[in-house]
Image: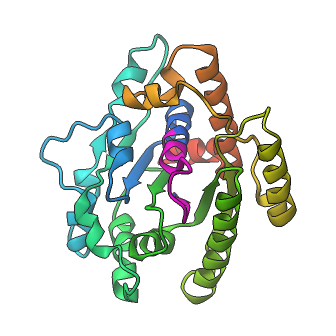
Amino acid sequence: MQVVSISSLKGGVGKTSMTLGLASAALAAGIPTLVVDLDPHADATTGLGVRPSGQTDIGRLLKDARRADLGAHAVPSGWVATAARRPGVRAATLDVAMGSAHSGIYDRPDLGRRDQRRLSSLLARVEGYSLVLIDCPPSLNGLTRMAWTASNKVLLVAEPGLFSVAGTERTMRALELFRREFAPNLQTAGILANRVRETSHEHAFRLGEMRQMFGDLVLSPTIPEQANWQQIQGAAHSVHHWPGESAQQAAASFDELLTNVVDPARMRRRTARV
C-alpha cells in the first residue's frame, strides 16, 4: 500500500484541491484508494461528497489508535455513485476517513514520538487499498508529522509566487530534518505547481526559479488556474466526471501527475493478485 501525504506549510495554495484531483485520477484509473482527511477544516471530506451514517471521524479514531478500526469507519465517496452511472464504467473503491475539528487536539508543535505514530498504527490494520492520500493541514505541527511518519512519500504543493516559493523552500528543509530524525525511508514525491497562469510573466519567472532551486523535483505538468474549479468542488464532483473541455484537460493533467507520483499499473496488478 502506497501512502502519500499532500503537504504545504503555506495555506491557500490549493493543497486540498490537488488531493481531490489525484483522488479523481485514482478513481478513474481503477485504483482502490483511501483519502485520509487530516486537516481539521475537513474540506476534503466535503469535496468528496461524503454522507456519513454513523462512522467515526479521524480525530476520534486517532484518540483510540491502538484499538480503533479505521477500515470499518471509512465512508464511500459520493463520487463513486456518479462514476458508476457512466456507461461502460466500473467504479473502483474511493473511501474517506472523515476529517473533523477533533483531530486539532494533535496539531501542536510538541507532539511526542508515541503520538506521532498514531496514524501509522491505524493504517497498519487497514486492508483493501492500494493507495492512501493524506490531506495534511498547512503547518508543521503534530498532524503533519503524524502524516509524514505514516507515509512513503510526500507531495508538496506550491503556487508560482514569491511567498509560496519561499514557503516551499522552508518545507523542503523541514522535510529533510524530519527524514533524518524520524523517517529515513521517506521520499519526496515532488513539488506540484498549482494555479499557473501561462500569460503571467511573474509566474513564468517563479516557475523558472523553482526549477533552478529544486531541479527535477518540480513535477510536470503544472496545474493551470481554472475558472470552474470552485464550481466543481462546490458540487462535490470528480473533475473526471465534470463536463467541458477545460475540466477534461485538468483531468488529463491529474492522470499524468498520478503516474509521476505513483505507478497506477503496478497498483492495479497488485490489487488483481489480492
Q: Position of residue 7 (x, y in %)?
A: 54, 60
Q: For the point 47% across and 54% down, which residue is it?
A: 132
Residue 185 appears anywhere in the view = no
Whether residue 91 appears in magenta in the rendering, the answer is: no
Q: Position of residue 228 (x, y in %)?
A: 53, 24
The residue lying toward the viewer, choosing from 224 and 185, is 224
Answer left or right for 158 relative to 89. right
Q: For the point 63% across and 15% down, which residue is it?
A: 245
Q: Is residue 44 above or below residue 83?
A: below
Point out the stretch of residues depicted in magenta. Answer: 4-20
Q: How is the image coloured?
A: rainbow
The residue lying toward the viewer, choosing from 171 and 53, is 171
Answer left or right for 125 relative to 224. left
In the current view of this chain or complex, which residue is farthest to the top? 87
Q: Is residue 205 above or below residue 25?
A: below
- The quarter of the displayed image where residue 201 is located: top right
Residue 134 appears anywhere in the view = yes
Q: For the point 79% across and 32% down, which residue is it?
A: 199
Answer left or right for 261 relative to 18. right
Q: For the point 35% across and 73% down, which residue is it?
A: 107
Q: Position of residue 266 (x, y in %)?
A: 64, 47
Q: Position of residue 171 (x, y in %)?
A: 62, 70
Q: Is residue 77 above or below residue 154?
A: above
Q: Is residue 140 above or below residue 95?
A: below
- The quarter of the displayed image where residue 217 is located: bottom right
Whether residue 14 appears in magenta in the rendering, the answer is: yes
Answer left or right for 132 relative to 18. left
In the current view of this chain or complex, which residue is farthest to the left? 54
